[in-house]
Amino acid sequence: MFQIMAHALTAATAQVPAQVPVPVSAQAPAEAPAATQTAAPQIAPPLSPNRSKAPKPAFKPINHDEDYSSFRAVRDANLWTRIKYIPLAGNTYASLGGELRLRPELRIGERWGRGPQDDDGNFQQRTRVWGDLQIEGLFRAFVDLEHATSTGLDSVVAPIEEGRLDFNQAFVEAHVPVGTARITARFGRQEIGIGNQTVFDMREGANTRRSLDLLRVMGTMGPWDGGFLTGHAVLEKLGTFDDETNHDYDLTGLHAGRTFGAGTHTGRAEMLFVSSDRASVSFATAPAARDRRRTLSLRYAGKADAWSVDVEGIRQWGAFGNLDIDAYYVTGTIAHGWQGGWKPKLALRVDVGSGDRNPGDGKAGTYGPLFPKPLTYNGDLGPHNLTIFQPMLTLQPNAKLTLDFSAAGLWRTSIHDGVYSLGGQVLRRADETDSRFFGKRATAAGRYALNPFTTLGFYTIYGDVSEKFKPGRDLFYAAAYLTFRI
């Protein structure tokens, strides 16, 4: 069935005219180095009958950012366009979508040799189906169901690895034009990705994606956009329809952004503030306590011809138990690309997450990420108390194939704090060594578009842990994946 659908949809979109509009996104792709923007969906004018050819798929990292209102004049082009635009009455239409991802993994030296290990491989599958009901420009209801399983995983089977059939998203949305501005109010369970997803990430690399239970109000006016959010995290569980609102993890935030320039010279400035309250958090230097944290992020991303830059600084303050929070995180990437040959792109990335410099000074100095994006594909290390220096290379041998390579040195920012996983688990205590240098890491990844709906890819990571952080194991992670999306 999988192969039949792939071949049918590929044949249906074999001829795509360049002038036909593709779906308009409410947010730029997460990997774009500049001008990532949150905007309200736009309604395209209907196409004339002689241009009713099938548009090319333009899938987005977050599925509800896709807008298929422009398909009303081309819906009869093929099976896929009929699924993406189902007319109901007047300007009311429905849209259906889905995803299947199959992924075998090999994990040697999980958590750099700490805790339960899985040395003989495992197999993961993630299936998602979603439906979107819209009254164009006025109202929307969106539902996204996810079912994810892991087979043969001998280590820890956590909700990030497995989640039986449940609502990944379920929200309603209203649109209100106010002069030249446009206001959108959204309520319910939803994925969220703001800016470069440093603070809010939808967790694409994991077997289960992440969503939050929020009320969001968003607006756009000219080059400006911004919004307000309040709600809770989701308490994820392994069973069927058992995920629930986590009332022990509250958050409220504001964000704003502005784009500059056009063409080959563009930029974007962003601000994000989040007030979070978690009932219990622990660090290597302090036992579990209530964490009331304020997080302020300032980011600028821009490009000028072949050069691009993305810099973000995060400051945290508040109270961790009886301690005052004094933490920070800085990340920056500068890159240069060439258009000839394999279109090589060289980049340098630096990340610095603060650690607790003096556990006895009455301050909690460890950077505490909220819903972070992993630093590598498998989330081997978290940004807490971590400094990374990482050259990167991207190659594109042809339009369908992309290859990524990187090498990194890993240090503890403070020798008085530990080493953490992405989820905050302490992998090395502060008193296990006096060394700052933790180890080296190399990664290689590739993805190939078999057709507009199917992607084949791989990624590998090798981490060489420093002798002063042993006993432990070097880390080797390898995975291949096949993703089919409609």
Image (cartoon, rainbow, N blue to C red):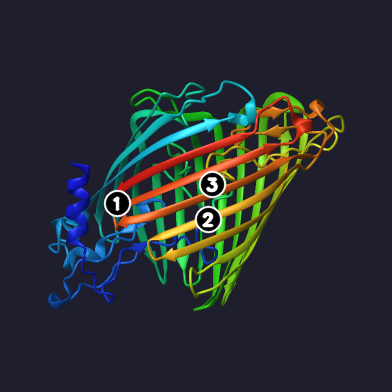
Q: Nearer the viewer, residue 36 or 387?
A: 387
How many C-alpha atoms fall within 10 Å of the one at disc 2: few (<14), some, or many (≥20)? some
Horizontal side, residue 72 vs residue 172: left or right: left
How many C-alpha atoms fall within 10 Å of the one at disc 3: few (<14), some, or many (≥20)? many
Residue 61: x, y in percent? 41, 52
Using the rendered image of the protein, determine whether residue 168 is visible from the camera's viewpoint.
yes
Residue drawn at x 64%, y 31% as measured from the top left = 112
Quadrant in which residue 405 is drawn: bottom right
Question: Sequence-wise, which precedes: disc 3 or disc 1?
Answer: 1
Residue 313: x, y in percent? 69, 55
Q: Nearer the viewer, residue 304 or 321?
A: 304
Residue type at mark 1 is Arg
Disc ID at residue 257: none
Residue 401: x, y in percent? 41, 59
Q: Nearer the viewer, residue 181 or 329?
A: 329
* Residue linked to disc 1: 140
Task: Measure how far apart labels 3 and 1 are at the Cα level.
Answer: 23 Å
Question: Sequence-wise, which precedes: disc 2 or disc 1?
Answer: 1
Q: Secondary structure at mark 2?
A: strand
Residue drawn at x 61%, y 57% as measured from the top left = 392
* Residue linked to disc 3: 200
Q: Secondary structure at mark 1?
A: strand
Residue type at mark 3 is Phe
Task: Measure how far apart labels 2 and 1 are at the Cα level.
Answer: 38 Å
Horizontal side, residue 274 vs residue 140: left or right: right
Looking at the image, is 237 positioned above or below residue 365? above
Residue 295: x, y in percent? 65, 46
Disc ID at residue 404: 2
How many C-alpha atoms fall within 10 Å of the one at disc 1: few (<14), some, or many (≥20)? some
Q: Secondary structure at mark 3?
A: loop
Q: Nearer the viewer, residue 370 or 78?
A: 78
